[in-house]
Amino acid sequence: MGKKTPFFTIAAVAFLITGNLIGAGILGLPVNTGIDGMIPSLVAMVVFGGAMFFSAVVLGKEAIQTKEENFNFPSLYHKYTGNVGKWVAILANMLILYGLLTAYLTGGSTIVCKIFNISDVYAKGILVLIFLILSGLTLSGNKIIHRFNAILMILLWGSFAIIVFIGQHHVDPVRLKHCDWGFLPVAIPIIVTAFHFHNIIPNVCHSLNWDIKAVAKAMLIGMCIGFLMNAIWIQVGIGMLPLSGGESSIIYCYKNNIPANVPMAEMVNSSTFTLFSMLFALLAIATSFVANGIGLLGFNRDLLFNFFKVKSNMIVSAVTFLPPLIIALIYPDIFLKAINVVGGVGIVTLFGILPCIIAFIKTRRRSVRIFSVVLLLLFSAVLLVQLGEDFGIIDIQPEEDEVYENVMANFQHKALPMQPEMPGIEYAK
């Protein structure tokens, strides 16, 4: 019998997982989830958090079975689904990594420009400056990040705690009562992204000496902490921001791809909140960009070296970083849209649908096979809805008049004011 993994080691890996969950995607959570409301979003978080945990365990078992430090997902899916699965995995992984880097660049420049009221004339210059800093950090490798990782995490979590503490004093409980299940599909892609840490599963398994029980515990603990932090952040964001009316409203931010901390800083109007909100946002973006950038560098290096016989690190770097920069310069306001595509297409395919297929193929237990099919259908539905939106087949865009009618219908049987100026909801006249 193998030596039992110490709980301290499990906890350390769990915090690593949580750190990957609390990335830049959290900046968009209150905006996307605010449209459908607190209760529907929490239900979706429970469902998709559980689904992502299931897929993570499936992939963890596969990584442990091979015990390879260079374990990669395209090869895994090729084993079970052939060349089709391998190339679907490659394309999905490219969509995830390129999409996230693009989102981080546009999100970072939007935050800096909006909070400091920088003119649009200088916006692209700010974006390029952020790109140079983040790509430079990424190319420096893991050394800098590992050296300062503890400090970065303390600053990230500390600033998060401060803005949540201040924000709680500006929460209007009435805003948390808004509930519109019809707009839940708007929130699901970013919720899926909020539970995505699967790229580091091989490292997690290696760190825990290929002990599946320890790996599952670390995943569960890390995801539960991440769930709690995301839920608190959503509660503060939805409770602070008006649903409609004005540039600080949830609908305005959703339609203009503005991260949640920008309108939250405007609502609080506190230099302390603005400072720590900015610190939290930029640290989340920087750490996420570097982590995913390193992953994309390695992915492109393997692809170019092995398939195209290109041995130039300069070309690898250019292929990795120039596409996100070009897309961000052409479409500077796609922060939330990019995250939705990443979550609703890339992540649900690579870390949702494909792991469920593996679970169905491998297991002999009837209950697990049924559960795998249910989750497969769930992830497939998310993919189809997102593709429908992207290609204009489905339109789930919230309009202020429609939201107003839904809010009034939801509140008409409750002891709440029945006029447009009702607490928690603001409307332009």
Image (cartoon, rainbow, N blue to C red):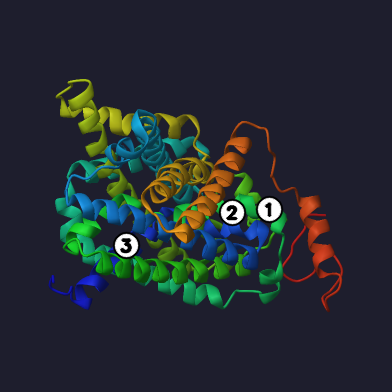
For the residues marked 1 and 3, what is the alpha-carbon distance in whole angstroms? 29 Å
Q: Which residue is mark 1?
A: 183
Q: Residue at x 29, y 44 (%)?
A: 134
364 and 117: which is toward the camera:
364
- SS class of the residue under badge 1? helix
Choose the circle earlier in sequence order: 3 or 2: 3
The answer to whether residue 411 is seen in the rendering is: yes
| Residue type marked 3 | Ile
* Quarter of the image where one finds residue 152: bottom left
Alpha-carbon neighbours of circle 3 within 10 Å: few (<14), some, or many (≥20)?
many
Q: How far across and how far down the image is residue 409, in percent?
A: 84, 63
Residue 141 placement, left or right of 352: left
- Identify the residue position indicated by label 3 in the image: 17
Q: Quadrant of residue 422?
A: bottom right
Relative side of 249 to 414, left or right: left
Picture residue at 51% right of the left edge, 48% below the top: 376
Q: Residue at x 68, y 62 (%)?
A: 242
- N-term mark: 1 or 3: 3
Image side of residue 68 versus residue 243, left or right = left
Measured as percent of width and height from the top left, residue 249 is found at 65, 57
Q: Are marks 1 and 2 in contact (CB under 8 Å)?
A: yes
Q: Residue at x 32, y 52 (%)?
A: 59
Query: Where does residue 355 sit, x and y in percent of width and height?
Result: 40, 48
Q: Residues within 10 Å of mark 1 (few under 14, many from 20)?
A: many
List the residue tagged with mark 2: 187
Residue 277 higher or lower than 62, as above or below: below
- Depth check: give the residue in front, 26 or 46: 46
Measured in 3D between alpha carbons, the distance from the residue under mark 3 to the one under mark 2, in whole angstroms, is 22 Å
When the figure is inspected, residue 77 is found, relative to residue 53, above or below; the finding is: above
Quadrant containing the N terminus in the rendered view: bottom left
